[in-house]
Image (cartoon, helix red, strand yellow):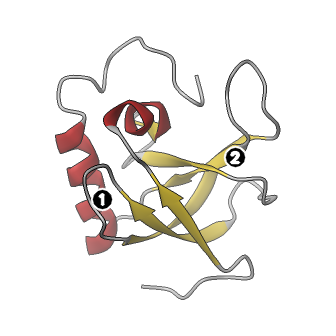
């Protein structure tokens, strides 16, 4: 796993499945997670995020590229960016756990932090 870049380690704690649903971008190849943050990022930036999923205290390491940016809070959507989940073993563990937690909800029409 690559070490954090110039931005350091970011953390993202997702407290419940509703927030997880709003944070998950299933339409991105391999999925992506939205990270609420006021730290500026650019599309394509490589970032390292320590993710905590609902009902867990374990911080899962995730390397990925920024694939979505909400520059400021608008329309009820928080400021932040989405990070594409990597294809490495750690990324696959996160993707599998997210999809297990969201089983049956991923294709819902409920609004999210990005759409």
Q: How crowded is mark 1: few (under 14 residues within 10 Å), some or many (20 or more)?
A: many
Q: Residue at x 69, y 65 (%)?
A: 45
Q: Is residue 41 above or below residue 22?
A: below
Q: Can residue 97 be seen in this view?
A: yes
The answer to whether residue 9 is left or right of residue 63 is right
Quadrant for residue 89, please give it: bottom left
Residue 65 in the image: state x and y as whole percent. Answer: 58, 61
Q: Residue furthest top?
A: 109
Q: Is residue 27 visible?
A: no
The answer to whether residue 27 is left or right of residue 92 is right
Between 28 and 35, the one lying in front of the other is 35
Mark 1 falls on what kind of element? helix
Image marks 2 and 1: residues in contact by CB distance under 8 Å: no
Q: Which mark is residue 81?
A: none
Q: Residue at x 22, y 52 (%)?
A: 97
Q: In this view, does 104 lie above or below 61?
A: above
Residue 36 in the image: state x and y as whole percent. Answer: 64, 48
Q: Residue at x 31, y 20 (%)?
A: 107
Quadrant of the drawing holding the N terminus: bottom left
The answer to whether residue 58 is left or right of residue 97 is right
Identify residue for label 2: 80
Mark 2 and mark 1: Cα distance apart in space: 19 Å
The answer to whether residue 21 is left or right of residue 67 is left
Mark 2 falls on what kind of element? strand
Residue 52 in the image: state x and y as whole percent. Answer: 38, 61
Identify residue for label 1: 94
């Amino acid at each position: 796993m690559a070490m954090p870049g110039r931005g350091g380690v970011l953390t993202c704690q997702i407290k419940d499945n509703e927030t997880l649903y709003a944070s998950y971008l299933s339409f991105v190849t391999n999925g992506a997670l939205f990270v609420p943050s006021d730290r500026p990022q650019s599309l394509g930036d490589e970032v390292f995020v320590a993710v905590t999923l609902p009902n867990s205290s374990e911080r899962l390491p995730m390397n990925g590229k920024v694939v979505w940016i909400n520059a400021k809070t608008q329309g009820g959507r928080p400021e932040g960016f989405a990070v594409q989940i990597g294809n490495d073993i750690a990324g696959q563990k996160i993707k599998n756990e997210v999809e297990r937690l969201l089983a049956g909800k991923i294709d819902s029409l409920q609004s999210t932090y990005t759409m």
